[in-house]
Image: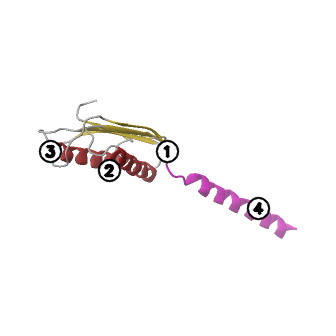
Amino acid sequence: MAIVQSFNMMSIALLIGLSLLLVAKSDPNTSVNLIVCNGNSYAQSDAYANSVAYVLADIMNVTPNHGYDYKTQSPYAQAVSYGHATCNTALNYNDCADCMIAARSAVTNNCLDKVGAQVSMVDCSMRYENYSF
C-alpha cells in the first residue's frame, strides 16, 4: 500500500512539474493589430535609407535590453530617422527579441521604402518616421 501511495505522489509531482514547464514556455503573440505606412517614399540610394536601416536595427536589438520601451534616432545629420519600439513586459527577453524580429519584418514587408511606418502587434510595437514623435 505504501508503495502505491508513494508512486501516486511521484506521479502527481511529475505531472505538476511538466505542466509548469508547459505554462512557462510561450511564444510572443505577433498577430498584427495595425500597420500604417507613411504615404511618402524614399529611394534606396537616398541617405535616408541608411537612417531607416540604422533605426530599425537599433530598436530591434536594443528594446529587449532596455526595459522593453526604447526610443532612438539615427546618427546621420543629413537625413535623420526616429524610432520607437515596445514589448509587453510580461514577455521574457527571448520572446521580446522574437517579437521585435517579427515587427521589423512586418514593417519592411508592408512599408518598403516608406518614409515612416508603424506596426502594432499584440505583444510588441515598432515605429519609425522622419520626424520626432
Res. 72 image quadrant: top left
Is 122 positioned to the left or the right of 131 in the image? right
Residue tagged by mark 1?
A: 31
Res. 43 image quadrant: top left
Distance of label 2 from label 4 (alpha carbons): 45 Å
- Helix, strand, or loop for circle 3? helix
Task: Please give the range of residues in magenta.
Answer: 1-28
Number of residues whose C-alpha sits closer than 10 Å to that of mark 1, classed few (under 14), some (14–19) or many (20 or more): some
Residue tagged by mark 3?
A: 47
Distance of label 2 from label 3 (alpha carbons): 22 Å
Distance of label 4 from label 1 (alpha carbons): 41 Å
Residue at horizontal 88 percent and vertical 68 percent from the top? 1
Residue 23 in sight in this render: yes
Marks 2 and 4, the one that precedes in the sequence: 4
Residue at horizontal 23 percent and vertical 47 percent from the top? 54
* Magenta region includes residue 5: yes
Are dots 2 and 3 in contact, CB under 8 Å?
no
What's the amino acid at mark 1? Answer: Ser
In front: label 4 or label 1: 1
Q: How far across and how far down the image is residue 70, in percent?
A: 33, 39
In depth, the one of 8 and 64 nearer the eye is 64
Are dots 4 and 3 in contact, CB under 8 Å?
no
Distance of label 4 from label 3 (alpha carbons): 66 Å
Q: How far across and how far down the image is residue 80, in percent?
A: 18, 38
What's the amino acid at mark 2? Answer: Asn
Q: How far across and how far down the image is residue 32, in percent?
A: 46, 42
* Magenta region includes residue 24: yes
Residue tagged by mark 4?
A: 9
In front: label 4 or label 3: 3
- Helix, strand, or loop for circle 1? loop
